[in-house]
Image (cartoon, helix red, strand yellow):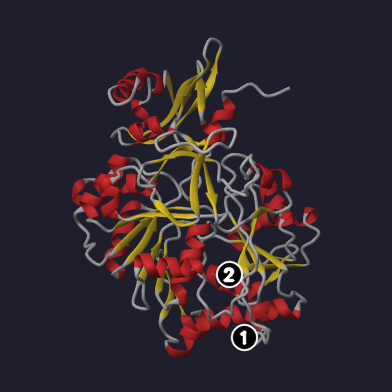
Amino acid sequence: MHPGAIAAVSPDKPAVIMAGSGRVVTYRELDEESNRLAQLFRASGLRPGDHVAFMLENHPLFLAVAWAAHRSGLYYTAISSRLTAGELAYIVDNCEARVFISSAALADVATSITEVTPRVGIRLMLDGTAPGFASYEEAVAAHPPTPVEDECQGADMLYSSGTTGRPKGVKPALPAASLDEPGPLLQLIQFLFAPSAESVYLSPAPLYHAAPLRYCMSFQRLGATVVVMERFDPERALALIEEHRVTHSQWVPTMFIKMLKLPEEIRAAYDLSSLACAIHAAAPCPVPVKERMIDWWGPIVHEYYAGTEGNGFLYVGPEDWLKHKGTVGRALLGVVHVCDEDGEELPPGEHGTVYFDKGPQFVYHGDEERTRASRDPKGRGWTTLGDIGYLDEEGFLYLTDRRSYMIISGGVNIYPQEAENVLAVHPEVADVAVFGVPDEEMGEQVKAVVEPASMDRAGPGLEAELIAYCRDRLAPYKCPRSIDFREELPRHPTGKLYKRVLRDEYWPAKP
């Protein structure tokens, strides 16, 4: 149930295959590399409960670095490779990292934070060196490829992607179980998706995000092969499924949309028959998009709703989803409550803030105010990720939007996700964001910003067409009154939209 155990019986089996370069990391290499780095951590004075951070692109040794920290009982923070120097410095300092690892490809931003991250005692760089950084390869090679004597489980401490403000670090308790014992996530994955040592898992997203990192490591506990895309490309993803006979994969809805917008002849050109399980999460999927994916791939599309915080887990399989279209599932971990602003529980069908009860607790590291804000106002210890939704009579949850994105126009609550879901499937829309902008009479009005499939079409004609398209499918008050066009929207590689960045452009700065 960890790379060392797999390496003992299948040393030459691929643990990682990089989709672009074709580089293979075997289980022997994964085991030895992670052991050498764990030995370095111990030799440098790090003990269970200490902290390391790393900022890497989807690198062949990304998972080896994570395993080194995990099997030496450390907290480890994988950081987005797309952050600015200020954002990176905040996370490295906030998580109290004593070791920081990066790569030559990211040297410019990695070296820019040295003076403002004084807690870091060791800085290592893969594939080269830079001022203030030692060679990762030379440092690791000086240590034995055997496990540390006090091998024990660590835990990731990941940061929210910052779509609604400064990133928040989610610090769990370190597992008490031995390294050999599967944790709750692996047990859920085994129960729901039936992976095995023969599975091939395709990971098309950045590994620093919670789901790709945790699922890749979980599949490696079983001895499966993980195929990692350096960056997502819709046709290349289909080709990889055929080439590697992929059995399991995980996606976000924007990836589905991009694959569906490929020409029919391209979508039909690849053999996807090996794919037994396509998992998606991270953002709600428009109903027409998921319907088309099930029509194309068959009843193998599984969905879950959870967060980096780990306070609950909802799941819906394809059969139940087709009976409850739009749901993100029923609770398998935790109990779901939907409450009004005063914390009063609402009946089925009424929209409110989604809370989890009887699930794992969490804190936002070094941020008591945000931790308090994540609890229910009646002090029952229920926790929220900040989403709005409603339950049906059978306990299936439907997400409406983020609480912070709700538009209040003339005293009416409008959830922009509804208009986004409609516009996202229009053939001339590559991406879309809907949010509220100031309105003297109504308080807010609905605005859309669209990334068109072709900027040549951007203009009043397409604006009128899209507004009419939306009004044919939604009540007029839910539809945008105006649309602006951009060449690209600020979307996180994991699929989350930086809507706050767009919205702030339309609101006057607070004095």
Look at the numbered disc 2 and give the secondary structure of its residue. Answer: helix
* Residue 93 placement (x, y as % from top left): 74, 55
Type of residue at label 1? Pro
Look at the numbered disc 1 and give the secondary structure of its residue. Answer: loop
* Residue 331 placement (x, y as % from top left): 43, 54
Query: What residue is rendered at 55% in x and 73% in y?
Result: 64
Q: Is the residue 359 above or below the residue 217 in the image?
A: above
Q: Nearer the viewer, residue 410 or 448?
A: 410
* Residue 118 placement (x, y as % from top left): 81, 59
Query: What residue is rendered at 67% in x and 57% in y?
Result: 110
Query: What residue is rendered at 34% in x and 70% in y?
Result: 194
Residue 197 is labelled as: none
Q: Is residue 201 visible?
A: yes
- Left or right: where does residue 296 sit relative to residue 187? left
Q: Residues within 10 Å of mark 1 (few under 14, many from 20)?
A: some
Query: What residue is rendered at 36% in x and 19% in y?
Result: 476
Check contact, mark 1 vs mark 2: CB within 8 A. Answer: no
Q: Nearer the viewer, residue 359 or 47?
A: 359
Type of residue at label 2? Ala
Q: Nearer the viewer, residue 476 or 511?
A: 476
Q: Is the residue 56 above or below the residue 335 in the image?
A: below
Q: Residues within 10 Å of mark 2 (few under 14, many from 20)?
A: many
Q: How many marks?
A: 2
- Left or right: where does residue 211 sit relative to residue 295? right
Q: CA distance from mark 1 to mark 2?
A: 15 Å
* Residue 429 placement (x, y as % from top left): 34, 33
Please state, as top left, top right, bottom left or bottom right, where the C terminus lies in the image: top right
Residue identified by numbered label 1: 147
Residue identified by numbered label 2: 66
